[in-house]
Image (cartoon, rainbow, N blue to C red):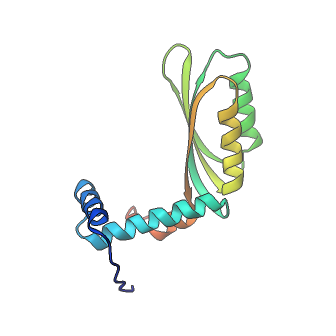
Amino acid sequence: MQRVTVTLDDELMTEIDAIMAARGYANRSEAIRDLARAGLARSRAETGEGRCVAALVYVYDHAARDLSRRLTHAHHDHHDLSVSSLHVHLDQGTCMEVSVLKGAIGEVRHFADGVIAERSVRHGELVLIPDGAVADKPHGHGHD
């Protein structure tokens, strides 16, 4: 581990201290390391290069003509990206799906954009985490 000295203005330090308090960090170094990791992960995701894990969450009209079939076909056509899906009935005609995806960032984004753009998909969002971000931080669950 390397020691780095950084000068931060009072306003930025106040924001970091607020994050520390809200998230329960023991010290500023831990908070700044996590914030730096998050910034680096976002930067990697923006370039579209590399691999990622992602969650695609979308809400759609269950009764819309052929939509369920089109969504199922989209997932089957990209079976190499799909890890798992959760399907939830929100009400009589509205469903939500959460799809866990894994693959090249560009391919995952392209797939997610296609699903979200389907007619009668009311809302969709992709949460993308570059693979490096997953491997950079120990998670303490005993998984390799």
Counting from the top left corner in percent of width and height, residue 136 is at 48, 70
- Residue 97 horizontal/vertical position (percent): 56, 33
- Residue under the point 22% across and 67% down: 26
Q: Picture quarter containing residue 120? A: top right
Quadrant showing the N terminus: bottom left
Left or right position of 53 against 144: right
Q: Quadrant of residue 111?
A: top right
> Viewed as shown, does residue 35 lie left or right of 104?
left
Residue at figure coordinates x 59%, y 64% from the top left: 44
Query: Would residue 24 be visible to someone looking at this image?
Result: no
Depth check, front residue: 73 or 127: 127
Classify residue 67 as left or right of residue 98.
right
Query: Vertically, is 84 above or below 9?
Result: above
* Horizontal and vertical percent position of residue 103: 67, 56
With respect to residue 142, does 129 lie above or below? above
**Foreground of the two, 93 or 8:** 8
Viewer-closest of 7 and 21: 7
Q: Which residue is at 39% across, 61% downward?
A: 141
Quarter assignment of residue 37:
bottom left
Nearer to us in this view, 117 or 75: 117
Image x and y of residue 117, in percent: 69, 33
Observer able to see residue 113? yes
Task: Name the residue located 58 percent from the left edge and 54 percent from the top edge.
Answer: 53
Q: Is residue 116 above or below residue 82?
A: above
Toward the bottom, the furthest residue is 2
Tell how many labels.
Answer: 0
